[in-house]
Image: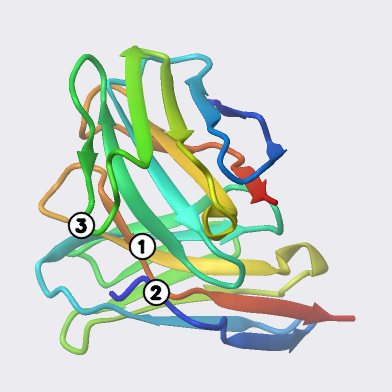
Amino acid sequence: GAVVSQHPSWVICKSGTSVKIECRSLDFQATTMFWYRQFPKQSLMLMATSNEGSKATYEQGVEKDKFLINHASLTLSTLTVTSAHPEDSSFYICSAVTGGSTGELFFGEGSRLTVL
Amino acid sequence: GESVGLHLPTLSVQEGDNSIINCAYSNSASDYFIWYKQESGKGPQFIIDIRSNMDKRQGQRVTVLLNKTVKHLSLQIAATQPGDSAVYFCAEITGGGNKLTFGTGTQLKVEL
């Protein structure tokens, strides 16, 4: 199947700093990517839909100024957690869709963020 | 279905037994359902899917059953193996596209 890569797979940062997580589709182009957040022992919560060349669509309750999403190319979407705080510590997972918004969906391996 | 849970239900089975993992969804308009397996520290892995015009679909060692009347989905794993130990999530899509809503999840533990 298609491969979606996330980088870094884990990151530790100090409170108040910003952290960027990358999501790449390695062997296909993805006009649509999704970002999820997962706390320990909980389900995946959709944060936003990332659309290539346009602004991301955020889910209700997700702060767009806190979680900046940039989908500048057909193979890369980035999530930047700005001014991170300990409560932002979580597992962030992206998924990418092949061939447009109704294609197949593949998940990345996730990025674990720990904010000290 | 609702996607937030405070804890994961756990299902413990003996190796070789069959496992049945259940999921209730709340949106009667959902038309596509997927089961995912998630191992610790990894992203979700596709297992099997089913569309709302079907009530059963079989894969290799797995079967998904859909009961739209009671909005219930189940995943059956035959001859459960230690490698099946993971968290299993159902997910639903409403109205096309790829926007998934995940269920609470179930932790499957396979005992030797």
Q: Chain of mark 1?
A: B
Location of the N terminus of chain B by quadrant is bottom left
Secondary structure category for the residue under label 2: loop
Q: Is residue A68 visible?
A: yes
Q: Chain of mark 2?
A: B
- Rendered image: mark on residue A60: 3
| Amino acid found under the numbered disc labelled 1 | Ala
Nearest to viewer (mark 1 / mark 3) = 3
Secondary structure category for the residue under label 3: loop
Query: Who's the residue at 54% across and 37% down the image?
Result: A108
Q: Is residue A2 visible?
A: no
How packed mark 3 is, by other alpha carbons closer than 10 Å (few <14, some 14-19, many 20 or more), is few
Find disc 2 in the rendering and name its residue.
B4
* Location of residue A58 (image quadrant): top left
| Amino acid found under the numbered disc labelled 2 | Val
| Amino acid found under the numbered disc labelled 3 | Gln
Q: Determine whether A11 is above or below B40 in the image.
A: above
| A35 relative position to A112: left or right | left
Q: Determine whether A78 is above or below A35 in the image.
A: above
Find disc 1 in the rendering and name its residue.
B91
Query: Who's the residue at 73% across and 69% down the image?
Result: B85
* Residue situated furthest right in the rendering: B112
Is residue A51 or residue A70 the one in the foreground? A70
Q: Determine whether B112 is above or below A86 in the image.
A: below
Q: Position of residue B19 (x, y in %)?
A: 61, 82
How packed mark 1 is, by other alpha carbons closer than 10 Å (few <14, some 14-19, many 20 or more), is many
| A92 relative position to B104: left or right | right
Q: Position of residue A86 (x, y in %)?
A: 59, 57
* Cα–Cα span, label 1 and label 2: 12 Å
Q: Are marks 2 and 3 on the same chain?
A: no
Please, which colouring scheme is shown?
rainbow
